[in-house]
Amino acid sequence: DNRNDTIAYELTVTDSTLGLDNNTLEGSLGFGSGGGALGQKFNVSSTSFASSVTFFCNSPTAGDTVNVELYTFTSSPGSMIASSDIYIFTAGDEANGVMLTLGFTSAPYQIAAGTYFVAVREYSENVSLGQTSFNFQPNTGFAKAGAGVWSPIEGAGFEVTFILRLNVLDPLFV
């Protein structure tokens, strides 16, 4: 307004992304036959609403399926508290790789401040979850083959961070 030298600017933040990677693909991990899940933990600093998960698959198999799951976390993944619908990979995903964002079926799902674990579940073929060596932190990434138990990925020789992000909404905007 030229009459009072005042400038007004309105900003609305509607989604925040929690991630550990630098979006630099250095390889990918997955199980293949028998399926399993790969993921990592995230620290949430205040009450929020988990809305979705964003992740990169380097070369998934067309026709194969994937979904994401949200777990409680203490020293390892605990109880599953939310999950997404299943996504079916396309020929384009296989040829070029794909960055996916899958919403939780119960989204937005309220979460208190604390530590949570996000997993990418593969069912048949290798999901080829993108990974980088940037920002590796021990006891952050875990894997579970089939119906087995969760184990830190560094125990299998993988000191990597997944290209995997938890998307949360600020409670003021829900």
Image (cartoon, rainbow, N blue to C red):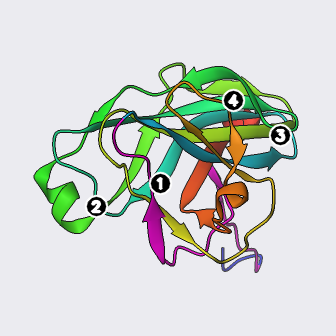
Residue type marked 2: Ser
Of callouts 3 and 4, the N-terminal one = 4
Query: Does the image show residue 126?
Result: yes
Q: Are marks 4 and 1 in contact (CB under 8 Å)?
A: no
Residue 71 circle label: 4
**Residue found at x 67% / y 54%:** 153
- Whole-angstrom CA distance, mark 2 to mark 4, is 26 Å
Total label count? Answer: 4
Q: Are marks 2 and 1 in contact (CB under 8 Å)?
A: no
Q: In which quarter of the view is residue 57 placed?
A: bottom left
Kindly state the secondary structure of the residue where label 3 is placed: strand
Q: Say few, some or many: other residues with alpha carbon within 10 Å of mark 3 (under 14 / 14 to 19 / 20 or more).
A: some
Q: Residue 154 at what x, y percent from top left?
A: 71, 60
Q: Nearer the viewer, residue 81 or 51?
A: 81
> Which residue is disc 1 drawn over?
55
> Which residue is disc 2 drawn over?
59
Q: Residue 8 at what x, y percent from top left?
A: 69, 67
Kindly state the secondary structure of the residue where label 2 is placed: loop
Q: Say few, some or many: other residues with alpha carbon within 10 Å of mark 4 (under 14 / 14 to 19 / 20 or more).
A: some
> Split into 4 quadrants, where in the image is the N terminus?
bottom right
Q: Is residue 107 left or right of residue 130?
A: right
Q: Magenta span: helix, strand or loop, mainly? A: loop
Kindly state the secondary structure of the residue where label 1 is placed: strand
Q: Which residues are magenta?
A: 5-33
Q: Is residue 87 left or right of residue 28?
A: left
**Residue found at x 73% / y 73%:** 135
Of callouts 4 and 1, the N-terminal one = 1
Of callouts 3 and 2, the N-terminal one = 2
> Which residue is disc 3 drawn over?
115
Answer above or below: position of 93 versus 65. below
Residue type marked 4: Tyr
